[in-house]
Image (cartoon, helix red, strand yellow):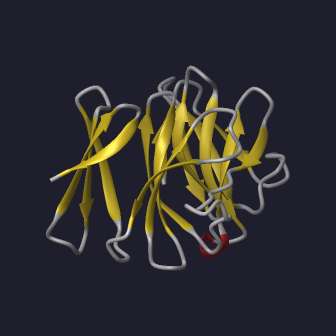
């Protein structure tokens, strides 16, 4: 996975750690579980970088199938695992974050849970718990989130479904539009 940070650096996720390439100095910085405090392995994939708040959301673990979501504080180098809870408040086990997109000062994440639900969460800087925005009880399918109109409209495109899902942010919550 390759993500630009808005300052000209390129973040490259690998199975052996996180590489940060600076084309201006032609230098490469390698970060791994030993240099990123709190990460659970060397398989690291950068997902979203918030330049203003100096936060990076990472997907990391000993291997892809065992990876978790973390927030990296670029100022301290510390990582904090993000907790995803379901509707009943239980921690969603055996979950796999699929797609990350920038949203306001954080990001949105689609997650497929072990009980075949697709969930949409919001991650905000400094919070160890993801905010559940939508539970999509439409079976298990992967969603590509796209935002429009100043983050007021959310469009979800499923890979193997013909139906697109459309939501609007009204009265501080996402409402499905038909």
Percent across and percent down for residue 165 are 22, 57
Q: Is residue 30 left or right of residue 106?
A: right
Percent across and percent down for residue 79 are 76, 44
In the image, farthest residue toward the top: 52
Foreground residue among 27 and 116:
116
Q: Is residue 28 left or right of residue 23?
A: right
| Quarter residue 89 falls in | bottom right
> Is 66 above or below relative to 126?
below
Q: Residue at x 54, y 78 (%)?
A: 114
Foreground residue among 169 and 100:
169
Q: Is residue 19 left or right of residue 163?
A: right
Q: Residue at x 60, y 71 (%)?
A: 64
Q: Residue at x 36, y 31 (%)?
A: 171
| Quarter residue 66 falls in | bottom right
Q: Residue at x 51, y 23 (%)?
A: 7
Percent across and percent down for residue 43 are 66, 63
> Is 8 above or below relative to 96?
above
């Amino acid at each position: 996975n390759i993500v630009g940070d808005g300052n000209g650096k390129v973040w490259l996720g690998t199975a052996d750690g996180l590489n940060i390439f600076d084309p201006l100095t032609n230098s490469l910085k390698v970060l791994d579980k030993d240099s990123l405090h709190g990460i659970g392995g060397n398989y690291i994939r950068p997902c979203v970088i918030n330049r203003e708040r100096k936060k990076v959301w990472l997907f990391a673990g000993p291997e892809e199938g065992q990876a978790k979501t973390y927030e990296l504080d670029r100022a301290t180098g510390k990582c904090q695992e993000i907790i995803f809870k379901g509707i009943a408040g239980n921690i969603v086990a055996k979950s796999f974050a699929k797609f990350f997109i920038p949203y306001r000062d954080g990001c949105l994440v689609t997650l497929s849970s072990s009980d075949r639900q697709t969930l949409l969460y919001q991650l905000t800087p400094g919070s160890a718990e993801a905010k559940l925005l939508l539970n999509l009880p439409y079976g298990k399918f992967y969603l590509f989130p796209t935002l429009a109109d100043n983050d007021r409209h959310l469009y979800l495109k499923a890979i193997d479904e013909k139906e697109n899902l459309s939501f609007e942010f009204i009265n501080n919550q996402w409402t499905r539009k038909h």
